[in-house]
Structure formats: C-alpha cells, structure tokens
Image (cartoon, helix red, strand yellow):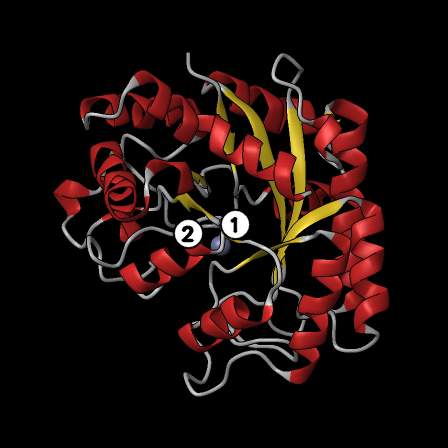
Amino acid sequence: MTRIFDLHADIGRELMEQKSKGEGISFADRHMKRLAAGGIQYSAAACFFTGPETWHEMKEMISLTAEQIQSHAGMILSPDDLKEDGDMAFLLTVEGMCGINAHIRKRITWMYEKGVRMASLTWNDFNLLATGLGGDPARGLSEEGRRAVKTMNSLHMIIDVSHANEHTFWDLINTSKRPLVASHSNCRKLCPHPRNLTDEQIIALAEKGGLIGMNSYSRFLSEDAENQNAAMLAKHAAHIADIVGHTHVACGFDFMDFIHFLKEKEETDICNASMAQNFIEALRREGFSEEETEDIAWRNAFRFLKDNL
Ligand SMILES: [Zn+2]
C-alpha cells in the first residue's frame, strides 16, 4: 500500500456525536482502524462549525479532538513532528470560524495553543470574518477577517480556502503573506460545481506556493453519475498537474461514511478510507510516474507542512 496524507476528514463532529451519546469515545476503533485500512498514515482531524455555533461550542469540539489525538496518536504541531517512518499522526484543523465573533487575535491564538494548524475562515455560509460560496457574491473578507489573516500568518496557522466564495478567495490571495491551501476542492473545468476551483484560482494558489487536496465527494467529481469514481478523481489531479505541476496536488478526500446523522450515503469506488488506494491506482493508470504518485499521495502535503508550519 502507498502511504497517504489526507488533508480533510470531519473527525471532530463525529467525536462530538459519540460524546453526546454518553457511551465513551473511541478514537482508535472509529478512526485509526478505518484510516489504516486504506493506508492513510497522516490525516487532518477537522472540527466543522457553521451558522450560529458559538465560541463555547468551538472550544468544546477542538478540545475534545485535540485530547483524543494526543492520547492515541501523533499530533503534527511543528515540522519536527513530521516523521517519514513514524506512527499515524493527525493535523488538527478547523472548518469555519463562526464562533470567532469577537476577540479575534485572542481566540485564534487559543486555537493555535490547542494545536490547530490549519483553518478556513468560513464554511458555505458567511460569518463576521468572511463569506462562503452560499453567501453574498459581492462580499468577501471583512476588516475582522483581514485581522484574522494577519494573526494566522503570524502564528503560521495555514489558511484553507475550500468553501470560500470567489470574492473571499481573491481577498485571501491578496491579503495573506503566506501560502494558502484548498484542502478539499476539485477542478471546475471538469465538474462545474461552485465548490470546485477555476483554472485561474488553481494558478493563483500555485503561484503562492499552495496545495490543493482532491475531494472524493461524488457531486464534486462529475455531473455524470457514471464518472463519479476514483478514475475521475485522478483526472482532476491530472488537470491541476497539467496547468501548474503535480507538486501542488494532494489528497483531501472528505470521506463522510462515518458521520451517522448524514442520511445520504455515497456508493462509489472512492467513498471511504478503505477505498483510498483506488485513487492511488487510478493515478498510476492516469500516467503519473511512481514518484509523482507518491508525491500526490503524501509527500506534497508532508513537504508543504515541513516548510510552512
Ligand atoms: Zn468541507
């Protein structure tokens, strides 16, 4: 099996779901086994927030996720924590900062101290800081959002642009002094979903030294049901490689099979961690060399974090 670095997995919410049932929390059984089955050695553990969720709720999920990672696996906090021959390790991330509606610097610093190393300012909705793709297209990053970017840059907390609307995306490109990541987004050229990136966005991310994680979610793969598969995901990777080079491509699968409250279940050949190697095989079939395949599978993300944490 080729080792994999997955830049997006909604683990925080699933842990909160377990906690709310009051049956004790199983990080190793629910997540580490699942990831190991597909060769995923490094994974993001994302804490997702939207709508009216508060700072208190953000603190609760981030604390629980950090505590679970630290009691079962490695936690990637600095370049030294990235070990090629090490055990399974997690990158604590945040998706949407709706709870940061005051005390911006203080709250982002709290997140950093808890171990958060990558975060997006907003999910599909909008908040005080920024506007997601479901928000007003004329609104981008706010003044408060610019302050958040400055704080994140100074802490070396990586800014994730997945879910940002185009206005916010370009504001982030122009405001951030450090490289940006689209942790789980594909190419709009191959699948015209607003969650996917235009070629101009892909070029801008690459020019800034950024990275794009390939997303397995069927509706971001193709409008055509028969092309919602690992082979198509490899075509998204190849499109990015064609325009900016394969060193900007990574994995950000966004598997959601383990989130029980989601009713809609995916039925493709790339819909849970145990199928992750199907993408790796598809990269080889797409014509990527063995070295390029490994770069996309894990080394690009690994190197990016070595250079940017
Ligand atoms: Zn997402």
Please provide percent x and percent y for residue 145: 65, 75
Image quadrant containing the C terminus: top right
Please provide percent x and percent y for residue 228: 22, 42
Which amino acid type corresponds to the residue marked 2 in the rendered image? Ala
Query: Within 10 angstroms of label 2, few (less than 14), some, or many (20 or more) residues?
Result: many
Task: Identify whether 161 is placed above or below 137.
Answer: above
Q: Nearer the viewer, residue 109 or 259?
A: 109
Total labels drawn = 2
Q: Is 37 left or right of 293, judged from the image as shown? A: right
Instruction: Tell me the quarter of the picture where residue 26 sits.
Output: top right
Q: Is 119 left or right of 107, judged from the image as shown? A: left
Please provide percent x and percent y for residue 149: 67, 67
Q: Residue at x 42, y 27 (%)?
A: 295
> Dot 1: what SS?
loop
Tag on residue 261? Answer: 1
Q: Is residue 31 visible?
A: yes
Q: Residue at x 31, y 64 (%)?
A: 200
Query: Within 10 angstroms of label 1, few (less than 14), some, or many (20 or more) residues?
Result: few
Q: Nearer the viewer, residue 255 or 188?
A: 188
Tag on residue 206? Answer: 2
Q: Mark 1 or mark 2, which is nearer to you? A: 2
Task: Identify whether 137 is placed above or below 250.
Answer: below
Between marks 1 and 2, how big is the CA–CA gap? 36 Å
N-terminal label among 1 and 2: 2
Instruction: Tell me the quarter of the picture where residue 43 sits.
Output: top right
Which amino acid type corresponds to the residue marked 1 in the rendered image? Phe
Task: Identify whether 291 is placed above or below 155.
Answer: above
Image quadrant containing the N terminus: top left
Task: Identify whether 61 is placed above or below 36.
Answer: below
